Image: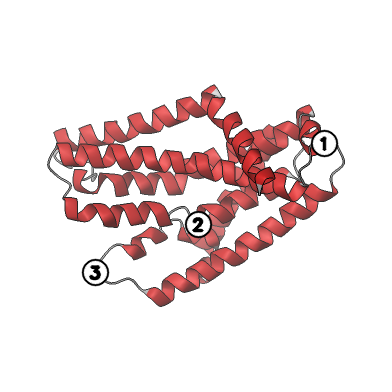
Amino acid sequence: MNAIKNGIINESTKLFKRSKYKILLICIGILTIALGLISNFTRGLINVSLSNLPLNVLSILTNILIPLVIFMAVADLFAAEQENGTIKGIITRPISRNEILISKLISILIYVTSILIVTFVIGLVMGIFFGRTQIINIPEIFIAYVVSIVPIIPTTLLSILISQLSKSSSSSVMLSVLIYIIIILLGIIVPSISPMIFISYTNWYKLFIGAQMPIKSILTIVGLLMGYSLVFFSGAYALFEKKEY
């Protein structure tokens, strides 16, 4: 456990110290503020309500921005280190490759969580400041943000799997984006398979909003996402373990 803990600290430090990831956090915060101000001064004419600002921004994050951030982070922590040879220094430490993979995975999820925290806090503050968000809705919004992390896990693991097949960070990003788009298009072109595609559940947090939660549907989705996560993790680990550096 200490090896994984130290690995998480090292990998997280790599991400948070890079200028582009600091700028990304700032830009996403500015985007949230901009949407809130536009909504307030246009009285919701752009279909973004201040009362639902955190949820509106969450939809943008889970469907577009976070997958792109994940693909970039995976490319930097996996493909780029394999490309420039810095991974050699990591695997020579007293830590298994399995622990290295888990450390990098958790570090990416920590960064994604920081994005969610920033948008959650800014969205709530703006909603409360302009008198549009009721205190009673805050726990529901918080739960929506917490559970939105679950569908992000298989997406991250798929990108890690793809990075093991890529020769450079740029090809890792492009291939991840391409495959992600193909999967989305498959769900649109063949609607019958959409319920079986993990990407179809990026907005599953909506199941937790309302008077009643469909427990059976939630458990089914959790099982599906866990299945995809295990498959992608197994594939990524098998390739990562066999690679020679």
Residue under circle 2? Answer: 151
Residue at image coords 18%, 55%: 136
Q: Residue at x 34, y 60 (%)?
A: 206
Q: Secondary structure at mark 3?
A: loop
What is the spatial separation of the Cα atoms under label 3 and label 1, in whole angstroms?
A: 53 Å
Q: Upstream in the sequence, badge 2 or badge 3?
A: 2
Crowd band around label 2 with a 10 angstrom C-alpha radius: few (<14), some (14–19), many (20+): many
Q: Amino acid at mark 2?
A: Pro
- CA distance for labels 1 and 2: 33 Å
Name the one closer to the observer, 172 or 179.
172
Which amino acid, mark 3? Ala
Q: Is 128 left or right of 144, judged from the image as shown?
A: left
On the image, the x and y values in percent for residue 215 come to 39, 74
Residue 94 location, quadrant:
top right
Q: Which residue is mark 1?
A: 92
Say which amino acid is labelled 1. Answer: Thr
Q: Quadrant of residue 4?
A: top right
Residue 72 in the image: state x and y as whole percent. Answer: 59, 36
Q: Circle 2 — which element?
A: loop
Q: Give the label on residue 211, or none.
A: 3
Residue at x-position 51% and y-position 42%: 110
